[in-house]
Image (cartoon, rainbow, N blue to C red):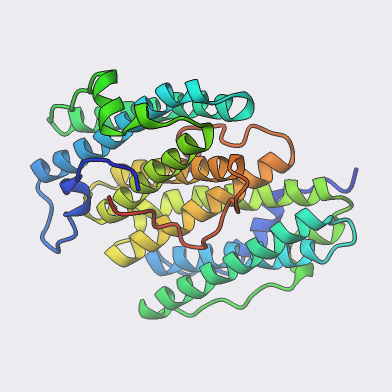
Amino acid sequence: MATLPAIAGLYGCGTDAETSVEDEVAILNDALTLELSLVAAYEIGTELLSDTAAEAADLFADQEREHADALRDAIEEAGGIPVEPRSRRGYERMLRLDELDEADDFLRLAVDLEQTAIGGYNVAVPRLASPPLRRIVYSIASAEAAHVTVLLGELGEVQAPDAFVAGARA
Amino acid sequence: MGAAVTWAGALGWATRGHAREHGETAFLRRLVRVEQASAVAYETIAEADFADARIERMATLFAEQEREHVQALNAALRDLGGRPPRPPDPGEIAGLDELGSQDDALELMIGLEEDLVTLYNRAAARFAGDALLRLGMQIACNDAQHLTVLRQQLGRRPVPDALVPEPLDG
């Protein structure tokens, strides 16, 4: 499983209490942290890939940037300060990207990361009070699931194995 | 080429008869109808003479997953005091009995799945309960995966958008 740091805001927010604006900003910043990790993973990992896998990684890096931008906008609109990305070396260490040797290793890591993101959104969505914000996370999660499908295809595996895509816990 | 197939026609069956219903229950019934239509359409395609082994396997798996979606959504509907709609007959799904080729079938299903992904995005703003919000996201993610595979089968960009496009009528 991907070695993302514990995203307490996303995975620990399953309480019945109403979410304050501060809590909501924290949840969104945790989601932004995940998306920035995905951007870095695809940017770095594409170096191991070729052909259709490399094309997919380049596209997904762009799409994760759009996800990050949407979350940044939402955080700022709520009066919060978006988290900043780490350095490339920081992501290499955190995600252990420098230990990957082969394309399939990276593809499996990418699947793990995407599933972790989906899992986080699945836990967080009821804690977001604003309907437009819920639509944004539904939309992002759907895109991450689509990414998983393409990645599984590159690995030669069943591309839509589960009727209910709940992702994974970090 | 077979008859022009439009997803709007297929959706027409799904929306007919719900005019007097309101709110979350009505929207849930609408979702169930489209999931039912998708399940029936995939079953029909899986058995079609034009379906090769790969399309048959895909359609069979996706039909099963749509049936699981229907079952879960119907359970949620009953919990809200709603009445599950009856599944459509294949002849009630516009365009289904006019399919002349695999490509026609894939186009029809792309239309239905695109409609589902859009409907779930709207659902994110309408669903009130935690469990239903999470269920909706999990199903939306699976339908997004179906859409990705269908696009790949037609040689199209599998994930064209980072975010689900906003519906014109909100």
Q: Position of residue B137 (x, y in %)?
A: 40, 55
* x 79%, y 59%: residue: B96
Q: Nearer the viewer, residue A27 or A151?
A: A151
* x 27%, y 50%: residue: A170
The picture quadrant where one finds residue A49 is top right
Q: Is residue A25 left or right of residue B17?
A: left
* x 59%, y 47%: residue: B114
Q: Nearer the viewer, residue A18 or A1?
A: A1
Q: Is residue B33 left or right of residue B127?
A: right
Q: Position of residue B50 (x, y in %)?
A: 88, 56
Up/down of A122 relative to A156, above or below: below
Quick one: quadrant of the C terminus of chain B?
top left
Quick one: quadrant of the N terminus of chain B?
top right
* x 19%, y 45%: residue: A6
Q: Is residue B72 left or right of residue A67?
A: right
Q: Position of residue B138 (x, y in %)?
A: 43, 58
Q: Is residue B145 left or right of residue B151?
A: left
Up/down of A15 relative to B151, above or below: below
The picture quadrant where one finds residue B45 is bottom right
Up/down of B81 relative to A134, above or below: below
Residue A67 visible to the viewer? no
Residue A147 visible to the viewer? yes
Q: Position of residue A62 (x, y in %)?
A: 45, 23
